[in-house]
Amino acid sequence: METRTLGKTGLELSIIGFGASSLGAEFGNVDLGEALRSVHVALDGGMNFIDTSPYYGRGMSEVLLGQVLPNIPRDRFLLSTKLGRYAPQHFDFSARRVAESIDISLERMKVDHLDIVLCHDIEFVDMTQVFEETLPALREQVQKGKVRFVGVSGYPMQMFKQALAQAELDVVLSYNHYTLQNDMALELIPLCAEKQVGLMNAAPFSARLLTNAALPPWHKATPQVRAIAAEAARHCHSRGVDIAQLALQFSIANPSFSTCITGTADPRQVTAWLEWAQQPLDEQLLAEVQAILQPIHNWFYVEGRPENNDPPRTVVE
């Protein structure tokens, strides 16, 4: 699989990264055997980057990875986890918790170092603490050899702009903002390039919005957004294409994003992604689908504290 350099880190990430949130049953119940096999299928298919968090399954994702990773040579994969968010309403970005969280993640996954550690969903807290306490504490873990590179992850574009302006970062991870429906993450490309910060994208399917699967109960899409996305999916079906295929191919095509992280606990889906990545993007179908999605182009929702979010320029009511 094609790889791309992640900013100034020198890391070479596969253009599709394996997102381990599904191993934490974030989208529904999982078969443990199939979940573990999905990791092997991803790695064997050339997906060398794994992204997880102690938040996913409240530790379950990391624990399951710990059943797989010790049997795989450490130079075969790059591993990212997060810290700071541990349950829907439980955040702790203190320096003390940084050290504890990293040690727990290392123990759960049975590895001796983490390639990337991200401050998770920082839009939910006073970001001053993240910039002044959390990230410096993470740099201490880099000095100890437990972590190689650090950054932030979350949803609002405004949050990333503040972080890039005020903090020293190696990488950032944006989700739901470079898809068929929302390409606002394009705003981050020049900001990251200026500082040689690695830019990673996640969730090309926008939490199943751009698939034929039922949305999870927590999805924030409005009725209009759901209806128009379903229309786009039907159009793809009429052309003999799964909209998920078009969505993935679109999101991995932009070389400014080092990787596109997407997750599953189903090895069959991983196999499909590997096949889709080798097939050409249908530019005509892409244009047709983007035209259907135009009324909800760059629709977004508020996540976290209002002051950490963009003004609602294009939110569809």
Image (cartoon, grey):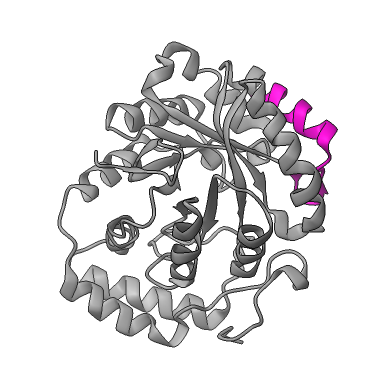
Which residue is found at the position 57% from the left and 74% from the top? 300
Asked if residue 209 is positioned above or below residue 275 in the image, the reply reads: below
Judge by depth and name the residue closer to the eye, 39 or 190.
Answer: 190
Q: Position of residue 240 (x, y in %)?
A: 18, 65
Judge by depth and name the residue closer to the eye, 59 or 15.
Answer: 15
Judge by depth and name the residue closer to the eye, 230 or 295.
Answer: 295
Image side of residue 243 versus residue 10, left or right? left
Which residue is found at the position 80% from the left and 43% from the top? 133
Q: Is residue 92 visible?
A: yes
Q: Is residue 132 magenta?
A: no
Name the quadrant containing residue 232. Answer: bottom left
Judge by depth and name the residue closer to the eye, 207 or 113.
Answer: 113
Q: Quadrant of the C terminus?
A: bottom right
Which residue is found at the position 49% from the left and 75% from the top? 226
Q: Is residue 85 visible?
A: no
Q: Quadrant of the N terminus?
A: top left
Q: Is residue 98 magenta?
A: yes
Which residue is found at the position 23% from the left and 50% from the top? 276
Report the number of numbered marks.
Answer: 0
Asked if residue 91 is positioned above or below residue 306 in the image, the reply reads: above
Asked if residue 289 is positioned above or below residue 137 in the image, the reply reads: below
Name the quadrant containing residue 264. Answer: top left
Q: Position of residue 313 (x, y in %)?
A: 59, 86
Q: Which residues are magenta?
A: 85-105
Q: Position of residue 194 (x, y in %)?
A: 47, 60
Name the quadrant containing residue 52. Answer: top right
Q: Position of residue 263 (x, y in %)?
A: 45, 44
